[in-house]
Amino acid sequence: MDVNTSTYYKSYGLGFQCLDENHVLEQADAEILDPDLQNLIIDYGPNNAWCGWNFKLEDTSGLIESWAHSEAQGFKTRWIMLFNVHKQREFAVRLLEKYNLSARLIGSLISSPGEGNLEIAKRLWHWSSVEHGEKFRIVGYNTLFNLDKLNLPPREAKPAGPEPKTNDASRTGDATGIPSRWAFARRRKGFSNDPVLPISGSPRLGIRSKNGGFTSKNVNEHSSFDNISANDEDALSNIHYHPRMLRLWMWIIVTADGTVISIHEPFPINGKPKVELDRENAAHIRRNLRMVLRCLSETRLSQQVETPSRDAKISIEEGALLIRKTDGPTSDLLLYYLFDDWFTTWGIVVQRAHPYSKDLSSIREQDPQLEHIDKLHDIVRRLASLRRIYQSYELVINRLLDEAKDFFDADSPLSFRPAAAFRINRLKYRVRYLAIPEIEDCESETQGLISLVRQIRK
């Protein structure tokens, strides 16, 4: 540990620790899994990295001043992670005020869950935002997470028995009031230990009518985890076909002084004690953050392999080591590695981890039935929504590249240096020629199955 650097932070009243020490890296990694974590800040350069967490409003002056004079310590980039930003609004505003953001933009950045920009984000999953100014560049977008990777609370078992009489509205939800695409099938079994999906997606349910046919029931999507009462009339209008995944909004702010601020939408709680549920799910939801964190520590750098690995996970992490090894500011590379979250966003499609591949395979193995048409219509609409989300990622990339050329000269700290520009262009082609075509292939397959079922049933 550099005693001079420790003394430097103490002179500003800040409790930073050396991230290059193994026990500090382990503690910082554990903090990212803590649902009560408010913020985590890392200052780093090619020769050292220091971090601290859960700073308070009274620390903002010290944080601002320490970064203004940090060049002598060898730091080139500062990364600030903000969680539950609506609970520390004044802290965030104090950190942002020197970058000349508009009041409207600051209001969007510190919105409470379900309000302001986050209200748009939860209804239009393909919503994205790219803003720039003389001292900043801001990107906002929805990240997606595979529900199969999350640890969800199980439903309470119910004894088998006659199905109670319910109205049509209550048939669209399960015992918790959360709409479920397979709610009808679960009730026919009498009981279930299946996990309760933490989404209030907008399923188009096939409910068997008295004459043996199927009718549709639509449920409005209010939020990715919001519980909707089965008797809520508003929940049966304004259908939104969203992917059956977890959606969380993320802001990435890059500033002219080498600071990168990532603001993360809180992920909700559903039925289990907060710490037990969130720590388990945070390992999946914040996996990319933890990967980037490890790559900023000399402890992780010393473990890199000498030859390229065939393990995709290790290869991705090895590539991200460039953030720490590069001389000069690396805010553009940090932006790229935060946005290019292979483990979640891109892996969903490229590795066929989205839920619709399994659904289509299951339907192909069965004899064509009328109810398959309703399921296939549901799938094709959700695939269209998923495609629009990935098209929004492509739009964000195009705007980033265009604005880098049109608004920032080559010497601007907000321009993309060659290493970052190369990777962002590569990501653009990966989205256009791998991710989106994969979804389009599933859409075509679904439409083909719909036509086949109709022909056979005729």
Image (cartoon, rainbow, N blue to C red):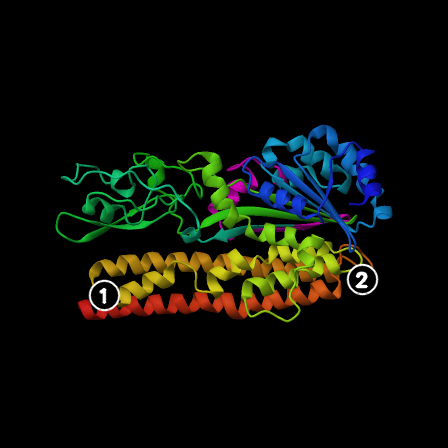
* Percent position of residue 314, x then y: 58, 63
Q: Quadrant of the C terminus?
A: bottom left
The answer for how far apart the CA atoms under marks 2 and 1 are is: 59 Å
Disc 1 residue type (three-letter): Gln
Which residue carries the number 2 mark? 410
Which of the numbered marks, if any, corresponds to residue 366? Answer: 1
Which of the numbered marks, if any, corresponds to residue 128? Answer: none
Q: State yes or no: residue 112 in magenta.
A: yes
Frontmost of labels 2 and 1 is 1
Disc 2 residue type (three-letter): Ala
Q: State yes or no: residue 265 in magenta.
A: no
Q: Magenta span covers which residues?
A: 109-138
In the figure, is residue 407 to the left or right of 273? right
Q: Inspect this view and state whether residue 369 appears.
A: yes
- Position of 218 relative to 103 (above/below): below
In the rendered structure, are the residues bearing label 2 and label 1 in contact, judged by CB atoms less than 8 Å apart? Answer: no
